[in-house]
Image: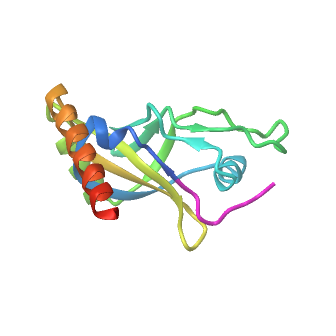
Amino acid sequence: MKISKDINIKNRRATFDYAIVETYTAGIVLTGTEIKSIRLGKASLADTYCYVNNGEVWIKNMYIAEYFYGTYNNHNERRERKLLLNRREIADLQKNGKESGFSIIPLKLFISDKGYAKIVIALARGKKEFDKRQSIKEREDKRDMARMFKK
């Protein structure tokens, strides 16, 4: 079992489907087997979103694989997990998250220098189809420019 200190799990689809307005870094309330699985890199942020309920921020549908050596204490893979933010940040997310077209999405899951699991969440606005085509065109243009200067 290889444990890596540089765990950096990204939601690659997020920047394609959403325009990022503001980002926040939050802690996550985890059980023992969950943090062990994250340290092994066994997590995914695909199809994950956040919501505010009773002054608390929750992340829903985040996948953390069951820990191989966990016994009956193992966790549920897709349970809802509480995020740890300041009151001011939660109030800001609650106010802006209710506006039409805005979502709270996770961008990146990582292990901090102190060994804690942290998640970067963003207040984002969904992109329209033409915005996505524009993003693809810009990415291809950058790639072509890099090829031309490399030669």
Seen from this angle, which residue lies furthest front?
151
Which residue appears at 81% of the width and 42% of the height?
A: 68
Instruction: Say whether residue 74 is left or right of residue 84.
Output: right
Q: Where's the C terminus, which quadrant?
A: bottom left
Which residue appears at 67% of the width and 38% of the height?
A: 65
The image shows residue 43 at horizontal and vertical percentages of: 59, 43
State the residue in front, 126 or 16. Answer: 16
Stretch in magenta: 1-8
The image shows residue 64 at horizontal and vertical percentages of: 62, 40
Instruction: Say whether residue 72 is left or right of residue 114.
Output: right
The image shows residue 1 at horizontal and vertical percentages of: 81, 54
State the residue in front, 40 or 96. Answer: 40
Residue 142 seen in the current view: yes
Which residue appears at 66% of the width and 47% of the height?
A: 34
On whether residue 21 falls in the magenta region, the answer is no
State the residue in front, 41 or 97. Answer: 41
Residue 91 seen in the current view: no
State the residue in front, 63 or 29. Answer: 63
Which image quadrant is residue 13 in? Answer: top left
Which residue appears at 27% of the width and 50% of the height?
A: 144
